[in-house]
Image (cartoon, rainbow, N blue to C red):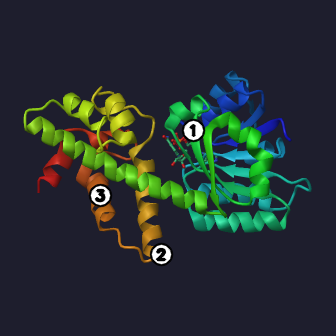
C-alpha cells in the first residue's frame, strides 16, 4: 500500500483533504492551476509539482478534487491514459462529476491496468479539513480495498454504492435534495416569521420534529440565521449539481417537476446570487427568491 498520495485541485475541498492526508502520515504531492494556492500548499509541507503529469508520477494513488467532469477527463487523459506507467495507479475522483465520464475513464484505465473510482463527497470544507467527509463510491471493489487507508484518512463514512458511476448518481440525487431542502426550509422559516414566530423558535421545533434535514440542523443555524453565509461552497458549483441532476433525469426519462421549479428559482437571474457567491445565500430569508415564490 502506497504511503504517498497525489492531490490535484487544492480548492476549498482539495486543500482540506491534502492536509488530512498529511496529518494521517501520508506524504502528499499536489498540483493546482493557481500559483497562490500552490504556495499555500508548499507552506503546509505538501510537495508541489509544476505539471499534473509530474504530480501523477509521484504517487500510486491520485486524488482529484476538480470543478467539472471535463477537468477530470482532461487530467486523467493527459496524465494516465497516455500509458506512461507500468505499475498500477488508482484514481479517486472526489469531484462532483458525471457518471458517463466516470464509466468511460474507468474502462479506459482498466485496459492499462489502472483503477478509477468515482468518489464524490459530502460534508463541505469542514469535513475535508477534519477527515470527516461522507464518501459515496462507484467502481470495482478491488480498488476500494486497496485505497481504504487513504479513504479512512479523509472520510468518516464510506459507502461503496455500486459499479462505476454509482457514486456520481448518488451524489447528484443527494445534492438535488439539498437544493430543494434549501428553498423549502427558507420558505418555511419565512412563513414562521411572517406569522410572528421568530425563525430561531421555529427551527428549535423543526429540528426536533419530522421537517428536519441536514439543512435545518447544520446549514441554516450555522450559515443563514447567523448571517455569515460562508459555508465554503459556491452557488456556481451547486448550480452545476442541479444542472447535472436534471440532465441525468432527462437521459433516463424521469419526470422531476419539483426539481425543475427549484432549478428555475436557483438560476442567477431569478435568485440574484452570482456563481462566485456562497450557495447559502440561496436560503436567505428575504430578497428576490421571496418575491419570486410569492408570485
Ligand atoms: P474550488 O473552486 O474551491 O477549488 C477548485 C480548485 O481546482 C481550485 O483551486 C482551482 O485552481 C483548481 N483547478 C481547476 N481546474 C484545474 C485543473 N484543470 N487542474 C488543476 N487544478 C485545477 O472548488 P471546491 O469547492 O473545492 O470543489 C471541488 C469539487 O468538489 C467540485 O467538483 C465540487 O462540486 C465538489 N464538492 C464541493 C463541496 C464544497 O462544499 N465546497 C462539497 C462537496 C463536493
Of all residues shown, which one is farthest toward the bottom?
Answer: 253
Which residue bears the numbered disc 1? 133
Which residue bears the numbered disc 2? 251
What separation in Å lies between label 1 and label 3 (alpha carbons)? 26 Å
- The residue lying toward the viewer, choosing from 293 and 236, is 293
Residue 272 location (% of width, % of height): 25, 47
Instruction: Name the residue: 86% across, 54% down.
Output: 88
Instruction: Name the residue: 24% across, 54% down.
Output: 270
Instruction: Name the residue: 20% across, 29% down.
Output: 201
User: From the image, which quarter does the C terminus lie in?
Assistant: bottom left
Instruction: Name the residue: 34% across, 68% down.
Output: 256
First reached walking from the N terminus: tag 2 or tag 1: 1
Secondary element type, mark 3 = helix
Which residue bears the numbered disc 3? 262
The reply to whether the residue tagged 1 has its Cβ within 8 angstroms of ligand 1 is: yes
Q: Is residue 3 above or below residue 254?
A: above
Q: Nearer the viewer, mark 2 or mark 1?
A: 1
Q: For residue 34, say whether it is visible.
A: no
Amino acid at each position: 500500500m502506497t504511503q504517498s498520495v497525489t492531490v490535484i485541485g487544492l480548492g476549498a475541498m482539495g486543500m482540506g483533504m491534502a492536509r488530512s492526508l498529511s496529518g494521517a502520515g501520508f506524504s502528499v504531492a499536489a498540483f493546482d492551476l493557481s500559483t497562490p494556492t500552490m504556495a499555500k500548499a508548499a507552506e503546509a509541507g505538501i510537495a508541489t509539482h509544476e505539471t499534473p503529469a509530474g504530480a501523477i508520477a509521484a504517487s500510486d494513488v491520485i486524488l482529484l478534487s476538480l470543478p467539472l467532469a471535463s477537468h477530470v477527463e482532461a487530467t486523467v487523459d493527459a496524465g494516465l491514459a497516455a500509458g506512461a506507467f507500468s505499475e498500477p495507479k488508482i484514481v479517486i475522483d472526489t469531484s462532483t462529476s458525471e457518471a458517463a465520464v466516470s464509466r468511460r475513464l474507468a474502462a479506459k484505465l482498466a485496459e492499462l491496468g489502472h483503477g478509477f473510482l468515482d468518489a464524490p463527497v459530502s460534508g463541505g470544507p469542514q469535513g475535508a479539513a477534519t477527515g470527516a467527509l461522507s464518501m459515496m463510491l462507484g467502481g470495482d471493489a478491488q480498488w476500494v480495498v486497496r485505497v481504504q487507508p487513504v479513504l479512512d484518512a479523509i472520510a468518516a463514512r464510506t459507502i461503496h454504492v455500486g459499479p462505476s458511476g454509482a457514486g456520481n448518481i448518488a451524489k447528484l440525487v443527494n445534492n438535488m435534495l439539498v437544493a430543494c431542502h434549501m428553498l423549502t426550509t427558507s420558505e418555511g422559516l419565512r412563513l414562521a416569521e411572517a406569522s410572528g414566530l421568530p425563525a430561531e423558535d421555529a427551527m428549535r421545533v423543526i429540528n426536533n420534529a419530522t421537517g428536519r434535514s441536514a439543512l435545518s440542523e447544520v446549514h441554516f443555524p450555522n450559515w443563514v440565521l447567523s448571517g455569515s453565509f460562508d459555508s465554503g461552497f459556491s452557488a456556481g458549483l451547486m448550480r452545476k449539481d442541479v444542472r447535472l441532476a436534471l440532465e441525468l433525469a432527462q437521459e433516463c426519462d424521469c419526470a422531476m417537476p419539483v426539481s425543475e421549479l427549484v432549478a428555475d428559482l436557483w438560476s442567477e437571474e431569478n435568485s440574484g446570487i452570482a456563481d462566485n457567491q456562497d450557495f447559502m445565500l440561496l436560503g436567505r430569508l428575504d430578497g428576490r427568491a421571496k418575491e419570486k415564490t410569492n408570485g
